Image (spheres, helix red, strand yellow):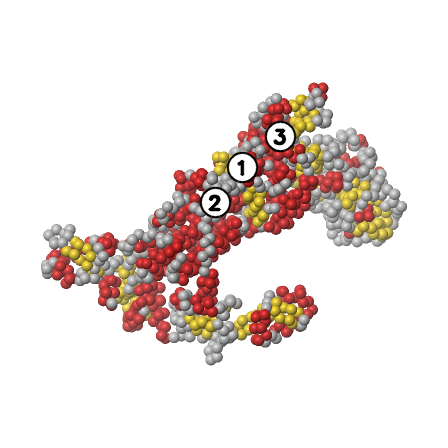
Amino acid sequence: MEEVCEGKEFSFPNQEERILRLWSDIRAFENQLKRTESKPEYIFYDGPPFATGKPHYGHILAGTIKDVVTRYQSMCGWHVTRRFGWDCHGLPVEFEIDTKLGIRSRDDVLAMGIAAYNEECRGIVTRYVAEWEEVITRTGRWIDFKNDYKTMDPQFMESVWWVFAQLFKKGLVYRGFKVMPYSTGCKTPLSNFEAGLNYKDVPDPAIVVAFPLKDDPQNAALVAWTTTPWTLPSNLALCVNANFVYAKVKDKSSGVIYIVAESRLSSLPSRKTKPSARNSAAQESSKTKGAANGKFENKGTVDDKVKSGLDTETYELLEKITGASLVGKKYVPLFDYFAEFSNAFRVAADNYVTDDSGTGIVHCAPAFGEDDYRVCVEAGIVQKDEDLIVAVDADGCFTERISDFHGRYVKDADKDIINAVKAKGRLVSTGSMVHSYPFCWRSDTPLLYRAVPSWFVSVEKIKDQLLESNKQTYWVPDYVKEKRFHNWLENARDWAVSRSRFWGTPLPVWVSEDGEEKVVIDSIDELERHSGIKATDLHRHFIDHITIPSSRGPEHGVLRRVDDVFDCWFESGSMPYAYIHYPFENVELFEKNFPGHFVAEGLDQTRGWFYTLMVLSTALFGKPAFRNLICNGLVLAEDGKKMSKRLKNYPSPMEVIGDYGADALRLYLINSPVVRAEPLRFKKDGVYSVVKDVFLPWYNAYRFLVQNAKRLEVEGFAPFVPIDLATLQTSSNVLDQWINSATESLVQFVRQEMDAYRLYTVVPYLLKFIDNLTNIYVRFNRKRLKGRTGEDDCRISLSTLYHVLLTTCKAMAPFTPFFTEGLYQNLRKVLDGAEESIHYCSFPSSNGMREERIEQSVTRMMTVIDLARAIRERHNKPLKAPLKEMVVVHPDADFLEDITGKLREYVMEELNVKAIIPCNDPLKYASLRAEPDFSVLGKRLGKSMGIVAKEIKAMSLPDILAFEKSGEVTISGHCLKLNDIKVVRQFKCPDNVTDKEIDAAGDGDVLVVLDLRADESLFEAGLAREVVNRIQKLRKKAGLEPTDIVEVYYEPLDDGKQILENIVSSQEQYIRESLGSPLLRHTLCPPQAMVFYKEEYRGVSGVSFIISLARPALIFKSEAILRLFSGNKMYAEAFQTYLLSRDLSNLKSEFQAGKGKIKVGCLEHLPEVEIELGKHLFLSVGDYYLSRTE
């Protein structure tokens, strides 16, 4: 393995760039697909984005989720085809072209020519493909851009035709009407997106109108409120809420009787308050007649003090009636323009009518309100598959049917319509209001809501099948499926799939001039059979001219294609079939693997792509399109607002990746609420925290392995080769057993969670695992890993760490593809037969070899350590100060055996205590008392709570122990369980000591009691720790690596000389184990030694001294060397000079190769001699010192 730099010098982004080059050089993604092509197919559907905009965090989030899952499945033995897709048609593309060319109306497009317009659209579809590929690739996502699919490809469009034709054959397609925002300036319907682009605050009339009931003995009139008087001539119904209470009231002055919702009596004009409609907010349906989604912002002068109660000075309450009793009643039409509609002019009911505004009665003009149309269809007033009379033309003017206002622009006619209503004696009150109203973003004219012809899929017919299909799917999180999506399906309406636009897949519907003959084409071949023309492109300008001869004979003319194109949601919903050109190709591939295994997109797609996938697959095949789904939430700016380029309230993705790397961004997103369909406030600091808390500790553990593996070679041992895993499983070391078991647990957990598509649970578990690896295994095993317990033990611990890191990298490769690849490329150099890339490896298998007892004991050990540290901090007792003993209290005999046996030395060293005493009697150091859990019992017990609480608090020790054993107790007739009563354990200080001398801490499971009393016998151990601490800090200050070998000298100063000498002597073993070499008196330093760092310390526990760091120096046994040369001093000195000139590490290697002996015969005039370590020389002062002490 190659050397690696310090964590603070390591650049994660730079390493990722190197990995990208590696993947490119070895064609990693392509080869992974090739290596798995014989495996079973895992079908993943990638929802197509528009390429007319650049990728943002939402795309990166969804892409990361998809990449994690598909990488994992590939490592689990599936062949996972990953093709990128592009949504090429629809409004976003047309919007760009309209803006670019200054197109303001449908007529402008027709004047330009559909062919020229569509080719302009085609020209910008792939504008940002390069940017998408750059960003997506840089985030580490493996997906095929070269073999992508586009919704504008003829093959894709042909499959869309096939889907529609199948629906038509099943009787699931009809032509009806859809109420949409309509621009009279451009003579075209707009999408809701376009309708929201240009809102203005404008004044509008607000009137209350009477609709007398027919056959009512009191001639009572229903009262409705509207801000769109121009819709009144097209009124066909009134709508109430069947669940509301309505009031009949009589005007004391005129004798007229009105019916309004009881809670909306204040909407009637009052003589004690100036009549105004301004105290009513808009209630028109979503209505509604001119207000997008019915969202009005009332900025008029509203008298907020007027209450909903009846003004008894003006009105007399006659009776109260239910809304349900009004349903079906007929009323006198306001105008007679639709008098021939026999089913019209009656009362319907719907829950969209609210009582927080208006009168509780809504006037319905089905041609001008979305809810109006729906209510009238459900009431049988109009039929959804029949033509609807729209009495307003494309210019927004009344048609001939509205004879009194024919040719008038509807908004201009408002005043005259109000006067006509007044002349009929039907105007109850009039006023005005200022509200926010949508205008056309192109023509700046007010939008109308107007019914336009559309082709529909009969979703309501298959609603039960849709709900059944939904049950067959698995969602994360499940509440989105069970609530949001289920509710959306339950209330599903027929789907308008056509749009009156140009750039899209044309509807394959050819209709005769008289409308009697209709042909729906399902393929290019069928079109050729009917028309004799072979189409190579299916866009409008290539097929609009194609006609089909009438099957009834030439006298009936030809069939021409309808103008409409598909809504782009229909195209994306057809993706599972169209992206592989089914059923024209890939029939076996599709039919063997449908439904697909996995999809993932944002929460907004519950009403978008997820919905259209479900509708089309259920209609076509009676089953869902997918089996598993992950739904993510919205990524917001740090301030909680939507990310905005204009506001610049978020950092660009490439900036974050450039600073911290893509892996850090991936983990940050995956480890957030956004993967549970909740919103995420994006914080760049959060990405940095992932680097700091996950990657740096992980990297440091890896670096520690590499350093100590290289150290073996530096010290002359055989290069590091990891011991096989089977042998390591038999290690007698408790922490080896623990980390092997913990790694097995990690693999099992990641497999379990990934199989359940719960990505968000993996990162917290990994975080804890990495923390345990670095702060338990590496920290507590330093001596073994550094070779201070012997070479064999060192190789076992290094091999264990190696396999743990290798397994962790494989388990996390789907999540952090760059970092794991970087580590793997170095780790694999000592492994025979290793794969070329980590992403070719199989996901680690679970062999079931777990040591649950030791895992639990080590977890408790860390709890003990944390609790003891907390006690030390509370009493200002630093870890350097040794303490006499610690008592560990726990009822589990196995744990006490482990903590005082296998784990004892780790706890003692970590906490600097000299003895650990087990105790399985919790009452020896603790008193128990019972407390009621008010949060649980309060609601349940009500008035009895006081009595029960008093008795709980009075429970005796035997009562509490009996309760804990049985799990329940009956108090005042109430059976209480373990979660109803809190058993509080309080430390009970032993007799004759204070809490400053002995203190305790617990977590409800284990109790730690620490003896804090000073003990002079521990002084030397404490001072030895202080000295070691200073030396380790000095090494760091000198820029030494842990593998760098130096000799450490001390020089006592002042009066504490003897104290320091005693400590070095009595604590020699501890010091030597901590430093890896003996601490040498300064007088032993030879003149040839190179001292490169020195520092003086004063007043360390009352002792002062100098520490010096020097390179190892040879020590000669001069008399023995002199004897080699028969007493010739000149030869002996020349020989020593030669040895001092040699590189020490090379010399050491030669001695190791010669088993402590080497021959030197290269010196001119000097005879060849054999020298032996220990007999003629030592390679360091430390070796010389140890030989003397031994």
Residue labelled with disc 1: 589
Q: Residue at x 67, y 35 (%)?
A: 170
Q: Residue at x 35, y 53 (%)?
A: 722
Residue type at mark 3 is: Asp
Report the disc number at residue 522: 3
N-terminal label among 3 and 2: 2
The image shows residue 965 at horizontal and vertical percentages of: 57, 70
Residue 242: percent from left, percent from top = 78, 48
Q: Nearer the viewer, mark 3 or mark 2?
A: 2
Mark 1 closeness class: few <14, some 14–19, many ≥20 residues within 10 Å: few
Residue 77 - label: 2
Q: Can you name the residue that lies furthest to the right here? A: 217
Mark 3 and mark 1 in contact? Answer it, CB < 8 Å. Answer: no
Along the horizontal axis of the image, is 300 left or right of 969? Answer: right
Give percent across and percent down for residue 918: 45, 71
Instruction: Give whichever of 217, 263 is nearer the camera.
Output: 217
| Disc on the earlier residue, 1 or 2 | 2
Q: Amino acid at mark 2?
A: Gly
Marks 3 & 2, CB-CB < 8 Å contact = no
Task: Please state which of residues 601 and 371 is positioned toward the viewer in this rendering.
Answer: 601
Residue 111 position within the rendered picture, expressed as x and y whole percent measured from the top left = 63, 25
**Residues under labels 3 and 1: Cα distance?**
21 Å
Mark 1 vs 2: CB contact within 8 A: no
Looking at the image, is mark 3 or mark 1 nearer the viewer? Answer: 1
Q: Residue at x 64, y 39 (%)?
A: 619
Please count the marks in the image: 3
SS category of the residue bearing label 3: loop
Q: Secondary structure at mark 2?
A: loop
